[in-house]
Image (tube, rainbow, N blue to C red):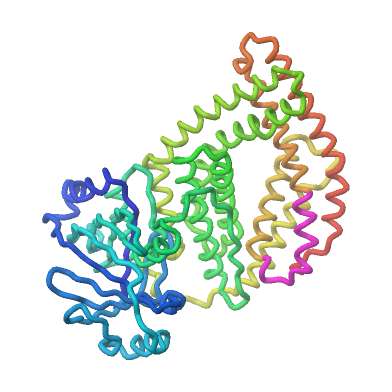
């Protein structure tokens, strides 16, 4: 049968409080049932089942042993969907022949191919589970699992919530999660328990190290519809945003805020480029929330850039100007205060609600009318058709913004920079649909032009930031450093602007690869 559940990683305090909140909100009318579950996951020596996306498990629940096979599993935005087949396993013994669904039995047999099956990992979990419901008809089982995963002589603690859909729409699972976890910073699970067990055996941990996450290519195929391609890139944006929200909250790595802002900007570009597919009130609302959060993240990112990438770099080049390092330190202290504020904001309700709603939008096709996700619709356009039209629109806007390039004022340059960035994202979204040898020259020249506009933007940011008189106070040495930085950054920007005209001509003369 099909299994759909939302999986969330919990800290100790949240794990202990979930069921109390469920009852206080009257989502549940009864106390949860406590059970101890021991699960053992099996595979061949070369992990043939894992490679095929199949998990094979024996679970002891009370006095019963149950054999479970999960196939065609997907886990995106915390939402796990899989086909699950169960059968009794007397004495806790595996038996492939006992799998009751013929097609699943045949697939497992083919993958195992006569090889011996060995335990890869096991979990020992105390589960508190019971039913929860919403007024919209959503009925789900809420399970809070606390215990250990063991593999290769190693052990790791696990705290997880699973909200499994029993009746209603998958969107209801996100509604339940929103009520149970109104704030605190969501941590969507990226791995099943089986996947965590394999990871523990291989690396000694049940999660990869937390680090800033760059955008990854989605590489759409020409056979996809525009809607399928849009969903893939939405999922990629979600993963980049969700991961870097955790990074900003937990680490001081300067790349975290940068990649979070990139993820939010890419998301807004997805909405713009795919508006013909995703457009509607919910998309517009999410775009507005992404803009709000991006502005908040941008305050920290701009301070980080000014302190470390601009002023500190200048101080290292000119050690005979001591005020530069003092100025860099003052900016770093401001960045530290902004980082603390952002961490609070990312754990509060508005940011958490945005993340939940974005996951729901991507995973339940929230761009469709309510209740229409399973209804027949007219055929969706091919992604290749949408790509050509979208790239042409972005290019047209860039050319319009670049008209009269030599006489553009600061605001007009800023608008051109934004148009170039949107074009860059659109190229990255669709590049896989076109021959690399045609894409590469255009993208190379676009990136070079963007660098110049990035320097111009940095100069404008530094000018605005250093115009705050309180930054220097009454220190004449720091005042001198401020003047130094204003002059140096402006000189570099103007030098770069001179080269921008030639770079624009190169790009403008490059044949658009989508034509």
Residue 398, percent from left and from top: 74, 52
- Residue at screen point 59% across, 78% down: 223
Work out which quarter of the rendered image holds the C terminus and state it. Answer: bottom right
- Residue at screen point 60% across, 62% down: 217
**From the viewer's perspective, is residue 483 above or below residue 277?**
above
Residue 40, percent from left and from top: 28, 70
> Taking 134 as reference, is 186 left or right?
right
Which one is in front, 212 or 454?
212
Which one is in front, 473 or 283?
473
**From the viewer's perspective, is residue 213 above or below residue 323?**
below
**From the viewer's perspective, is residue 484 above or below residue 120?**
above
Which one is in front, 304 or 24?
304
Q: Quadrant of residue 218?
A: bottom right
> Is residue 432 on the magenta stretch?
yes
Residue 369, percent from left and from top: 41, 65
> Taking 141 as reference, is 42 left or right?
right
Instruction: Specify start and end residues of the magenta stretch as a single range.
Output: 431-448
Residue 125, percent from left and from top: 23, 60
- Residue at screen point 39% across, 46% down: 352
């Amino acid at each position: 049968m099909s299994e759909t559940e939302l999986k969330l990683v919990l800290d100790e305090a949240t794990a202990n409080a979930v069921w109390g909140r469920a009852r206080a909100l009257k989502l549940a009318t009864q106390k949860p049932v406590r059970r101890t579950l021991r699960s053992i996951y099996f595979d061949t020596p070369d992990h043939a089942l894992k490679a095929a996306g199949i998990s094979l498990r024996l679970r002891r629940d009370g006095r019963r042993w149950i054999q479970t096979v999960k196939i065609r599993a997907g886990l995106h935005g915390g939402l796990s969907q899989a086909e699950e087949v169960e059968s009794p396993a007397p004495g806790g013994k595996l038996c492939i022949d006992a799998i009751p669904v013929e097609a699943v039995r045949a697939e497992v047999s083919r993958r195992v191919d006569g090889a011996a099956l060995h335990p890869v990992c096991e979990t020992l979990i105390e589960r508190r589970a019971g039913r929860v419901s919403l007024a919209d008809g959503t009925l789900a089982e809420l399970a809070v699992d606390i215990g250990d995963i063991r593999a290769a002589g190693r052990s790791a603690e696990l705290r997880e919530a699973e909200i499994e859909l029993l009746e209603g729409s998958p969107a209801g699972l996100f509604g339940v999660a929103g009520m149970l976890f109104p704030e605190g910073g969501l941590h969507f699970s990226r791995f099943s328990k089986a996947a965590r067990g394999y990871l523990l055996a291989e690396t000694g941990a049940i999660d990869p190290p937390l680090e800033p996450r760059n955008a990854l290519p989605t590489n759409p195929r020409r056979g996809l519809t525009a809607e399928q391609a849009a969903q893939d890139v939405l999922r990629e944006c979600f993963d980049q945003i969700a991961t870097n929200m955790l990074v900003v909250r937990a680490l001081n790595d300067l790349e975290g805020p940068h990649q979070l802002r990139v993820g939010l900007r890419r998301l807004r570009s997805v909405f713009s480029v795919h508006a013909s597919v995703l457009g509607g009130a919910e998309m517009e609302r999410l775009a507005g929330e992404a803009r709000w959060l991006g502005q908040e993240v941008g305050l920290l990112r701009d301070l980080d850039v000014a302190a470390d990438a601009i002023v500190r770099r200048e101080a290292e080049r000119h050690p005979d100007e001591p005020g530069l390092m003092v100025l860099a330190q003052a900016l770093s202290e401001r960045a530290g205060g902004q980082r603390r504020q952002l961490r609070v904001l990312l754990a509060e309700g508005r940011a958490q609600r945005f993340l939940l709603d974005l996951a729901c939008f991507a995973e339940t096709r929230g761009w469709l009318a309510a209740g229409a996700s399973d209804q027949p619709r007219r055929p969706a356009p091919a992604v290749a058709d949408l790509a050509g039209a979208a790239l042409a629109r972005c290019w047209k806007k860039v050319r319009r913004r670049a008209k009269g390039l030599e006489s553009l004022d600061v605001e007009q340059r800023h608008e051109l920079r934004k148009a170039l960035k949107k074009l860059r994202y659109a190229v990255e979204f669709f590049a896989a649909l076109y021959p690399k040898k045609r894409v590469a020259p255009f993208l190379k020249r676009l990136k070079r032009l963007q660098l110049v506009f990035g320097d111009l933007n940095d100069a404008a940011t530094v000018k605005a930031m250093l115009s705050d008189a309180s930054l220097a106070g009454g220190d004449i040495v720091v005042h001198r450093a401020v003047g130094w930085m204003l002059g140096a950054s402006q000189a570099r920007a103007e030098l770069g602007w001179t080269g921008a005209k030639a770079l624009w001509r190169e790009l403008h003369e490059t044949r658009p690869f989508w034509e």
